[in-house]
Amino acid sequence: MSIGVGASRADAPENAQLTVESALTAVEACINNVGAHPDIAGFQDLAHAFDLKSAALAARATIETALERRETRGCHNRSDYPDLDPAPQVNLVWSGPGTVEREPIPPIPVEIAALMREVSTGGKLVE
């Protein structure tokens, strides 16, 4: 499922993006059929069901925001957008399926900016 949305990627062919979406949709459909039954040990099934549901929700948020990214930033590399784009100084905020909003990042306070320095990634394996 990482085709087209991994940390190092290029725009996936449209059919690959649909494959990622359809695979996640199929997983979510299966989750709806998971049964949780209390037993002598308690509600372990219910805890596992909640863990599974939250993992699928996090996967959807990660995938949808990764598809929005059109630059290389930090350890997220795009071979089709290899450079850092200074224009989108935003956080991608996921607010539910199909809803990715761009939230501006406030300027760095002067006292923190004074402590910062540029670090070269040249010749380093950055993962």
Image (cartoon, rainbow, N blue to C red):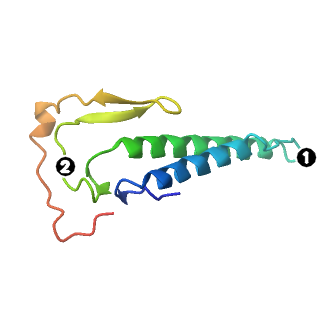
The residue at the point 40 percent across, 32 percent down is 93
What amino acid is at disc 2?
Leu
The label shown at residue 40 is: 1
User: Would residue 108 be seen by someone viewing this image from the given angle?
Assistant: yes
The residue at the point 41 percent across, 55 percent down is 12
User: Looking at the image, do the residues carrying marks 1 and 2 touch, with CB atoms under 8 Å apart?
Assistant: no
What amino acid is at disc 1?
Ile
Q: Is residue 29 left or right of residue 87?
A: right
Q: Is residue 83 left or right of residue 24?
A: left
Q: CA distance from mark 1 to mark 2?
A: 55 Å
Q: Residue most toward the bottom?
A: 123
In the rendered image, residue 16, in percent from the top left (x then y), is placed at 49, 55
Give the mark, 1 or 2, whose residue is nearer the N terminus.
1
For residue 56, above or below residue 1: above
The residue at the point 60 percent across, 45 percent down is 56
- Which quarter of the figure has residue 106? top left
Reading the image, the residue beneath label 2 is 84
- 55 or 116, which lies in front? 55
